[in-house]
Image (cartoon, rainbow, N blue to C red):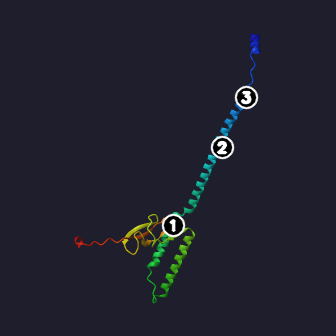
Amino acid sequence: MQEHAAAEHDTAPPEQEPAPEQALQEAAERIAALEAELADMKERWMRAEAENANVRARAKKDVDDTRQYAVQKFAADVVDAADNLKRGISSLPPATDDQPAIVGKVREGLEGVERSFVSTLERNGIKREDPVGRPFDPNLHQAMAEQETDLHPPGTIIQAWSQGWTLNGRLLRPAMVVVSKAPAPELTGPAHK
């Protein structure tokens, strides 16, 4: 029986090698498939690199913002102290020639402290903004009152109850302001007398 199986094995036709044209065709198809796969992988790699660059840029911006604005609560407290110092100086009686010398010295000393204090704040990115004379901007100002006047165009800040403050260009505290509005038209005629 083994001889019969061996005989059948010997009589099986030998496998034929593919024709050269067919081999070239198969090789060309294989090369095209590999090139397409390479292009796909290259595109995926480029997208992944771009995404990594975006993640790094966002992380760097977040770290920079955190560094720059980490003191925001402290800065808000400090500007309250600066405003209180300014209010204290403003509450002093006006300078006169017959005032005691000590009052003048106290005023000068407090004004010097305030200048130094505000200068220190400015060096650290905290700036006071004087809004008087500027157009009202609800992003920077808080309107506390409106006042009729024909001396200023409507929507102009004519008085600041408190100054606005920014921290590195970002609003820290809005200015509390009085905004001008057009005077009401005078009603005349027999029905309004």
Dot 1 amino acid type:
Thr
Write down the residue under mark 1. 166
Front position among marks 1 and 2: 2
Q: Position of residue 131 (x, y in %)?
A: 46, 71
* Distance CA(mark 1)–CA(mark 2): 47 Å
Q: Earlier in the sequence, mark 3 or mark 2?
A: 3
At x 73% / y 28%, what residue is drawn? 21
Vertical position of residue 107 compared to residue 160: above or below:
below
Q: Quadrant of the N terminus?
A: top right
For residue 177, which numbered disc appears in the image? Answer: none
> At numbered mark 3, what does the secondary structure look like: helix, strand or loop?
helix
Q: Quadrant of the C terminus?
A: bottom left
Front position among marks 3 and 2: 3
Q: Position of residue 115 (x, y in %)?
A: 53, 76
At x 77% / y 15%, what residue is drawn? 10
Q: Earlier in the sequence, mark 1 or mark 2?
A: 2
Front position among marks 3 and 1: 3
Q: Position of residue 101 (x, y in %)?
A: 49, 87
Q: Residues within 10 Å of mark 2 (few under 14, many from 20)?
A: few
Write down the residue under mark 3. 21
> At numbered mark 2, what does the secondary structure look like: helix, strand or loop?
helix
Q: Position of residue 30 (x, y in %)?
A: 69, 33
For residue 42, which numbered disc appears in the image? Answer: 2
